[in-house]
Amino acid sequence: MISAVVAVRSLEEEERVINNLKAYPFQEIILAEGKNPSLQRNMAVNEAQGDIIYFFDDDSALIPGGVESVLEVFNTDSSAAVCGGPALTPDTDTRIQKSFGAVLASSWASAKSSARYKKAGVKRYTGEHEMILCNMAVKKDVFTGMNGFREDLYPNEENEFLSRVSASGAKIVYEPKAAVHRSARADYSAFVRQCFNYGRGRGEQAVISFDNSAIMNFIPALFVLYLLFAAVTGGGILISIPFFLYLALTLAFSYETAAKLNDIAFIPFIFLSFFTLHLCYGAGTIFGLVRAITGNKPEIDTEVKLKTIRKI
């Protein structure tokens, strides 16, 4: 039995979520309303009857064949504990949204994590960097056996959980055919918040449990510190060389990304988006580190409402 778990802001979203999922082989759909997605999902899993839990976001639009490809992985590979695929930017998104989606799908923006936003390669064993929680299935006994997501961590709660899965020796499978459509952020300010919050989550996660494989994620934080150092010292030729090299590489990747979108005229905006992602993710990482170390984190909201829809 497979259960779909969806964290929602309001149970009023029920009709839209059910319409999205009803054509797929879920025996039950559990909606979890609240302001703490990690807690919402944990409580939903506790109520779920399925032996496989498939996590989606309320705006994940399923693509035919995706769920079936995940079930095939679990049916044919007994070592697989987690399986998921990418979240693709739909063709119906705006020009700006497609640009944000293409930036996130670039290795210059997010290295290995770019596989979360494009169909990258073939089915393979992987780690936390290529998984995204809006399209991820896990065996229930593995999830509960590891006490689920940390409820004091959001975002990056799935990354911390997946690091524990890998450490246990269980396998995580990336299946590019198991894709969903999910719209990118609608405007620049939302993209700024997204990048900062992703960085903040990474910083807080590092304090909870540092993983050596996540060192690459701290390069943007070092970049921010470098820019601050250059500003304070007044720069100079030697200090400025890395920045000009960065600008040249960002311009090259901006051209490549715009060409893939067939939108060369949007190179300046894509360039700005790359710079914004690196700067805001880095600043968010530093903020998250400081907040976690000082213990100055907001209280956890524990109010959650669940609604289960079971197929007959």
Image (spheres, helix red, strand yellow):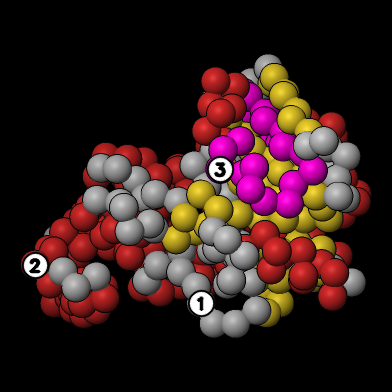
Q: Name above or below for residue 129 compared with residue 31.
A: below
Question: Which residue is drawn at the image coordinates 16% and 69% (left, top)?
Answer: 263
Can residue 67 be spotted in the picture? yes
Please tell me which of labels 1 and 3 falls first in the chain.
3
Question: Which residue is drawn at the image coordinates 86% and 45% (left, top)?
Answer: 50
**Residue at label 2?**
265
For residue 20, the mark is 3
Task: Give the farthest residue toward the bottom.
Answer: 122
Residue 25 part of the magenta-drawn span: yes
Please provide percent x and percent y for residue 284.
42, 46
Residue type, numbered disc 2:
Ala
**Residue at label 1?**
120
Compared across the picture, whether 251 is left or right of 265 comes to right
Question: Which residue is drawn at the image coordinates 36% and 41% (left, top)?
Answer: 193
User: Over which residues does the magenta segment extend?
Assistant: 18-42
Please provide percent x and percent y for residue 210.
67, 58
Secondary structure of residue under mark 1: loop
Question: Which residue is drawn at the image coordinates 62% and 63% (left, top)?
Answer: 66
Residue type, numbered disc 1:
Ala
| Residue toward you, 171 or 228 | 171
Crowd around label 2: few <14 · some 14–19 · many ≥20 (10 Å): few
| Residue toward you, 188 or 235 | 188
Please provide percent x and percent y for residue 26.
74, 47
